[in-house]
Image: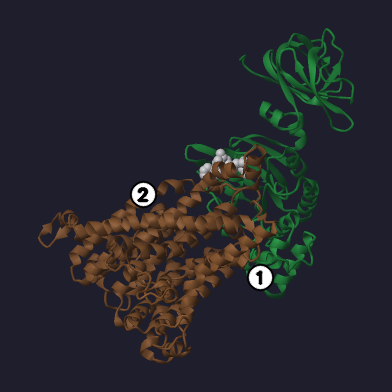
């Protein structure tokens, strides 16, 4: 029975570690938010009577709601197009269209800037075509934020709806047809209700992502503030107390939203109990319709990929040469060479690589431990462990940045607080916390999918725990581990929102270098770094997905 | 000599006892079938034997040694899992080598023993196959070979045929039986199929709700079931309420829905109400007659040489009777009498009036 005790002990250690990393910093912020210099106060309430605070919070909420709507309007029809109809180029387009999912938000934002910004490619073209004095529009304010959100978050609806469609049982649709339901009625009465869980999941994900969104409001917001940018601005102004209060309020909105939107996700079981064949795609027979669908598909794909193509283009433009011409007059490798040759400018690349790697290794290790303890050994408190691992998902990155900055800027070892802010360690730690939900989700799912009798079979064959872990469990978990690791790496590698609050000069990551290059109007280097970010992210993600399905 | 002994094993999950005071002895080299309906505690018993569950009460003894608290790793009980649990990332030979490596076997000795185990299940030459490339039947044999390769003390099989196509089952059953006889290993097999239990087991233990109802050779169980549950569960039968009047000139006199029968070939039972469990071949059909039980044919099924008729009696009981094909038609009124060669196919179990 001592074995059981040891497992329980390890479970306790993991639980403490998670509490220290995730809950403790949040609680410290909460306390500081409610406590002024002279004890407990209700400044919290008072500050929200100030118009700009309330409007930032409201801005966060309505931007998120509209983002959900817009993302759904793009993503759902796209999913039906690619999920239900067969036309030339469907496969590759279907894959390309999902690409924005793996690209760091900041890349999308600067790509938009180069394309539709004041001096962007499209804006200039229109200005010239119409002979205008001014750019035809300003990419600024709520409209710009919504545009970027719709563009980067439709992918959630697209992927969730496609997964939902693929898991439909063809015989259910056939049953509806045999009961005399036409296409429209089948869609309304059968297909959509079966898709609700998927759509609910996508809506929740979009809402939370857009509530936490920082890059788009930061770059395009202008005078329009949402809570995330408001927090950073307050903090940069040195008003730490107000920043805490704002942090607390954003967290509350996030948690309330999570709680309110939980409903549809409970229906997971509805789509889960799947048996039978997925519906076959409708092979479009009529030539004209086929052509139209193919054109539509290609057109959409080009439209959606245009920002990234622009980024690529800009990365080859020498400093200050492209002003008003429709296409750049000259091309160069210079921007990329700068990254490689100038040690100061190459530094962020190496920083991002090691920061992301370190946090990924740590996240995978913790997820693995959680899998062994929670799924395998079923230690008491496993629900809590899994809940804690999922928690950072619901908390915006800005909030965690503030929380970690608060918790780890004080030296009080007995209270579990150390000075990490300003050191090398705060960024990997922040990335780790942010990555725990997505990594552990992949790894725990991998553990759940393992047949527990494989472990038992190993035991009857005389293999001890360690040998079973090494020779049976880990090899079988490889796809899940790789998937979890690649997601973690990609997120950390492109992180902007936590980095901007916690970086030091020595640990400045790529995203911060992009920002400072943009500020210095060194557009080419910013674009080159954007391309690097994009390429590494896509490559790592493809590697994870490929190994994941092949292994 | 008793090789494996289960002594009063009890395992509770919450309030419910999945296995309840189970005692059994198994001889060296014997093959015992655990038979029972779904949920009767068969798998739990097997897992108690393998060491995956620890009993709340009772002991497992091997050759007089108490192994109850031994970890599965050191118990040296081989097990074939219901879904085989083959390691999908290893090939066939690596699967077979897994248990041998635990014993420290390596090099040529390892190869030799893997090859021998593969030959045992007739899969020589399959060493480098991936598990996914094997048919269900082949996977089953690899699982068997993997369990046998380290030469365990006891072999445990959980529903070994349930994952196979019905067309494959009979053949695989024969193969398993021959293989285990050849190896001579002490075996406990779990199944809910009576055919399998009878065909494979030297003896059969019938479980219900975690309790042992009866253990014996297939012939014993069939000819003298200890109670109604065993009688109904083992073999095809139907049951009907009767009143036992007492000994008659020839055999025992009973009244069934007003018909008086003298049963010559049945178990002794005291006078009073009873349940009669009767096999189809122990009854015969005739035209309605004074001493016959009267009913209507509701269904006729061909089973080869004879047909199986379902008769609804006037009292509302449903009885199955074997008879020559086409002897009666559905809807016809018939009489039923005990056949002259009942062959131990009628059992009486006294019970209180409802
Ligand atoms: N791990 C468990 N936890 C709770 N109940 C269980 C567990 N394993 C089995 N049971 C219950 O014990 C009873 C016997 O189960 P089992 O041994 O699997 O029966 P069988 O193999 O004969 O179908 C069932 O009612 C089952 O639900
Ligand atoms: Mg079972």
In the visual, does A348 lie left or right of B168?
left
* Element type where label 1 sits in the image: loop
Q: Where is residue A546 in the image (x, y as percent from the top left)?
A: 58, 69
Q: How crowded is mark 2: few (under 14 residues within 10 Å), some or many (20 or more)?
A: few
- Give the residue displayed 78% in from the left and 14% down from the top: B295
Q: Where, quadrant-wise, is the C terminus of chain A in this rendering?
A: bottom right
Given residues B22 and B82, the one toward you in this image is B82
In the visual, does A420 lie left or right of A449?
left
Q: Is mark 1 within 8 Å of ligand 2?
A: no
* Element type where label 2 sits in the image: helix
Q: Does the residue labelled 2 lie within 8 Å of ligand 1?
A: no
- Give the residue displayed 45% in from the left and 56% down from the top: A4
Q: Position of residue A43 (x, y in %)?
A: 15, 57
Q: Tell me the shade of chain A.
A: brown
Please determine whether, in this image, residue A477 is positioned above or below residue A384: below
Mark number for residue B105?
A: 1
Mark 1 and mark 2, same subunit?
A: no
Given residues B111 and B83, the one toward you in this image is B83
In the visual, does A463 lie left or right of B294?
left
**Letter of the green chain:** B
Mark 2 lies on residue: A259
Q: Residues within 10 Å of mark 1 (few under 14, many from 20)?
A: some
**Given this view, does label 1 or label 2 mark the residue nearer the observer?**
2
Q: Position of residue A362 (x, y in %)?
A: 42, 70
Q: In which quarter of the image is ligand 1?
A: top right
Q: Mark 1 lies on which chain?
A: B
Mark number for residue A505?
A: none
Please determine whether, in this image, residue A236 is positioned above or below residue A209: below
- Give the residue displayed 78% in from the left and 26% down from the top: B279
Please determine whether, in this image, residue A94 is positioned above or below residue A426: above
Q: Which chain carries label 2?
A: A
């Amino acid at each position: 029975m001592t074995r059981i005790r040891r497992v329980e002990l390890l479970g306790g250690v993991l639980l403490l570690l998670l509490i220290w990393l995730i809950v403790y910093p949040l609680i410290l912020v909460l306390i500081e938010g409610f406590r002024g210099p002279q004890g407990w106060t209700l400044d919290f309430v008072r500050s929200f009577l100030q118009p700009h605070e309330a409007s930032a919070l409201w801005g966060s909420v309505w931007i998120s709601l509209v983002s959900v709507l817009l993302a759904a309007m793009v993503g759902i029809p796209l999913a039906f197009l690619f999920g239900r109809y067969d036309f030339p180029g469907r496969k590759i387009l279907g894959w390309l269209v999902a690409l924005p999912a793996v690209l760091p938000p900041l890349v999308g934002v600067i790509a938009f800037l180069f394309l539709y910004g004041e001096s962007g490619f499209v804006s200039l073209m229109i200005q010239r075509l119409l002979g205008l004095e001014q750019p035809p529009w300003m990419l600024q304010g709520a409209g710009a934020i919504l545009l970027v959100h719709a563009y980067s978050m439709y992918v959630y609806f697209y992927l969730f709806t496609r997964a939902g469609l693929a898991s439909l049982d063809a015989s259910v649709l056939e049953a509806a047809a045999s009961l005399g339901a036409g296409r429209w009625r089948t869609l309304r009465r059968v297909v959509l209700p079966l898709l609700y869980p998927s759509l609910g999941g996508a809506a929740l994900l979009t809402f939370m992502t857009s509530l936490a969104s920082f890059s788009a409001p930061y770059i395009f917001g202008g005078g329009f503030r949402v809570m995330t940018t408001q927090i950073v601005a307050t903090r940069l102004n040195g008003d730490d107390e107000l920043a805490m209060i704002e942090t607390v309020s954003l967290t509350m909105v996030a948690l309330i939203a999570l709680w309110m939107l939980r409903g549809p996700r409970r229906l997971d079981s509805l789509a889960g109990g799947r048996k039978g064949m997925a519906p076959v795609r409708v092979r479009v027979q009529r030539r004209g319709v086929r052509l139209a669908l193919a054109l539509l598909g290609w057109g959409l794909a080009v439209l959606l990929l245009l920002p990234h193509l622009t980024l690529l283009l800009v990365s080859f433009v020498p400093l200050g040469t492209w002003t008003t011409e429709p296409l750049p007059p000259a091309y160069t490798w210079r921007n990329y060479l700068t990254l490689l040759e100038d040690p100061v400018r190459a530094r962020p690349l190496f920083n991002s690589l090691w920061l992301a790697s370190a946090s990924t290794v740590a996240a995978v290790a913790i997820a693995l431990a959680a899998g062994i303890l929670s799924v395998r050994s079923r230690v008491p408190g496993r629900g809590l462990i899994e809940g804690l691992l999922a928690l950072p998902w619901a908390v915006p990155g800005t909030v965690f940045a503030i929380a970690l900055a608060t918790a780890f800027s004080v030296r009080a070892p007995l209270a579990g607080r150390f000075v990490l802010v300003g050191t090398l360690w705060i960024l990997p730690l922040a990335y780790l916390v942010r990555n725990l939900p997505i990594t552990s989700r992949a790894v725990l799912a991998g553990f759940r999918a393992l047949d527990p009798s494989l472990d038992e079979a190993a035991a009857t064959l005389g293999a001890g725990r360690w040998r079973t872990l090494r020779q049976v469990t880990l090899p079988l978990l490889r796809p899940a581990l790789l998937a979890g690791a690649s997601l973690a790496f990609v997120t950390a590698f492109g992180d902007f929102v936590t980095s901007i609050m916690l970086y030091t000069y020595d640990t400045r990551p790529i995203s911060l270098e992009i920002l400072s290059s943009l500020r210095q109007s060194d557009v080419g280097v910013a674009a080159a770094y954007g391309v690097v970010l994009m390429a590494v992210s896509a490559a790592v993600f493809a590697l994870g997905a490929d190994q994941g399905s092949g292994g | 000599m008793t090789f494996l002994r289960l002594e009063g094993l009890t395992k509770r999950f919450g309030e419910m006892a999945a296995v309840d005071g189970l005692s059994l002895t198994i001889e060296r080299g014997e093959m015992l079938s655990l038979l029972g309906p779904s949920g009767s505690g068969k798998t739990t018993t097997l897992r108690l034997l393998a060491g995956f569950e620890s009993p709340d009460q009772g002991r497992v003894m091997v050759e007089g040694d108490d192994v109850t608290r031994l970890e599965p790793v050191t118990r040296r009980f081989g097990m074939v899992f219901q879904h085989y649990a083959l390691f999908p990332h290893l090939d066939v030979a690596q699967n077979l080598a897994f248990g041998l490596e635990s014993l420290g076997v390596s090099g040529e000795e390892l190869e030799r023993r893997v090859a021998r185990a593969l030959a045992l299940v007739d899969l020589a030459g399959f060493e480098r196959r991936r598990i996914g490339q094997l048919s269900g039947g082949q996977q089953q044999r690899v699982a068997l070979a993997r369990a046998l390769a380290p030469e365990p003390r006891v072999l445990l099989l959980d529903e070994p045929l349930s994952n196979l196509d019905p067309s494959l089952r009979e053949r695989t059953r024969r193969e398993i039986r021959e293989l285990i006889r050849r190896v001579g290993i002490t075996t406990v097999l779990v199944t809910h199929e009576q055919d399998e239990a009878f065909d494979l087991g030297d003896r059969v233990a019938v479980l219900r709700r975690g309790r042992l109802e009866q253990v014996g050779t297939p012939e014993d169980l069939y000819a003298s079931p200890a109670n109604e549950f065993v009688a109904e569960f083992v073999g095809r039968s139907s049951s009907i309420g009767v009143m036992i009047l007492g000994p008659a000139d020839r055999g025992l006199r009973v009244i069934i829905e007003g018909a008086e029968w003298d049963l010559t070939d049945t178990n002794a039972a005291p006078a009073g109400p009873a349940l009669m469990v009767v096999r189809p071949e122990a009854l015969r059909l005739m035209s309605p007659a004074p001493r016959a039980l009267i009913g209507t044919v509701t269904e006729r099924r061909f089973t080869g040489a004879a047909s199986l008729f379902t008769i609804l009696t006037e009292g509302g009981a449903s009885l199955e009777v074997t008879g020559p094909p086409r002897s009666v038609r559905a809807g016809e009124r018939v009489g039923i009498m005990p056949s002259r060669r009942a062959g131990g196919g009628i059992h009486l179990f006294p019970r209180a009036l409802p």
